[in-house]
Image (cartoon, rainbow, N blue to C red):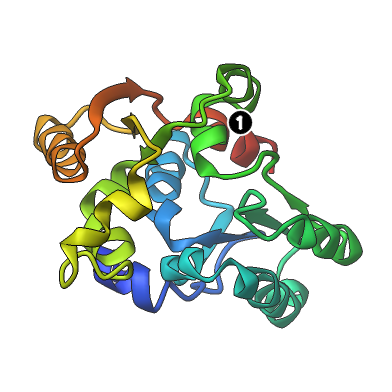
């Protein structure tokens, strides 16, 4: 069984199994959702490789990591699909995918495609901070510790003073995880809002793949 622990997905990712006709190269933060969709839909032809989710804290490294993964494994599969949105790469990932001849998920980031890119853009929210299921579980690893808030809580206002709301985009209906996300909002001094998105356009993108 693959190691799908959040810490492993954050730091090391998930290697492909070598089985299947279509390889999905994804962010480790999407592993649980993609595995669930594979099981729900019987997509046994999909294989999954996840890059370390912590790359989201260094978006300048995402494009090179995706390109390396595609080039290493594309000859072993009939098709490769990239389960990333732009994710802070400033268009470089999209340009690289076009050059490689592989498709990727549309939109600026996972918050947008979970809610639906068009619906997300219409909201035009500039004072909201977003969490997904994965980020709610890994809040300390992705937000609190990297920003030094565990050591310097006085920095909270500098980082998040312009935010008003923490929006938890829930992929699953988990009361314990909702409580955890709400606790994150309280720590940040933000109003809490929960939106149940399910898998959103991730399911559509994988279905097309």
Comparing 8 with 1, the one in front is 8
Residue 202 x/y as whole percent: 55, 37
* Residue at x-position 14% and y-position 45%: 187
111 vs 87, left or right, is left
**Which of the 4 image quarters holds residue 141?**
bottom left
Helix, strand or loop for disc 1: helix
45 vs 36, left or right, is right
Residue 22 x/y as whole percent: 66, 57
User: How many marks do you count on the picture?
Assistant: 1
Q: Is residue 43 above or below residue 69?
A: above
Comparing 49 with 176, the one in front is 176
* Residue at x-position 26% and y-position 70%: 148
* Residue at x-position 31% and y-position 59%: 143
Residue 163 x/y as whole percent: 37, 36
Q: Which residue is mark 1?
A: 204
Residue 174 x/y as whole percent: 16, 32
């Amino acid at each position: 069984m693959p190691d799908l622990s959040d810490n492993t997905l954050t730091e090391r990712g998930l290697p492909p199994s070598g089985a299947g006709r279509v390889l999905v190269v994804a962010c480790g933060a999407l592993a649980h959702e993609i595995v669930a969709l594979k099981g729900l839909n019987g997509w046994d032809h999909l294989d999954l490789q996840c890059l370390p989710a912590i790359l989201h804290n260094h978006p300048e490294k995402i494009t090179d990591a995706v390109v390396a993964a595609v080039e290493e494994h594309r000859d072993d599969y009939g098709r490769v699909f990239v389960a990333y949105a732009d994710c802070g790469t400033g268009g470089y990932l999209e340009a690289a995918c076009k050059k490689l001849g592989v498709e990727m998920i549309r939109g600026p980031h996972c918050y947008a495609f979970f809610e639906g890119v068009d619906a997300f853009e219409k909201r035009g929210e500039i004072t909201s901070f977003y969490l997904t299921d994965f980020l709610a579980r890994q809040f300390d690893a992705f937000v609190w510790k990297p920003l030094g808030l565990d050591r310097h809580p006085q920095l909270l206002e500098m980082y998040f003073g312009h935010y008003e709301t923490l929006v938890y985009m829930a992929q699953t209906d988990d009361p314990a995880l909702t409580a955890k996300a709400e606790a994150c909002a309280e720590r940040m001094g933000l109003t809490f809002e929960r939106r149940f998105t399910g898998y959103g356009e991730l399911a559509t993108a994988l279905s097309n793949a």
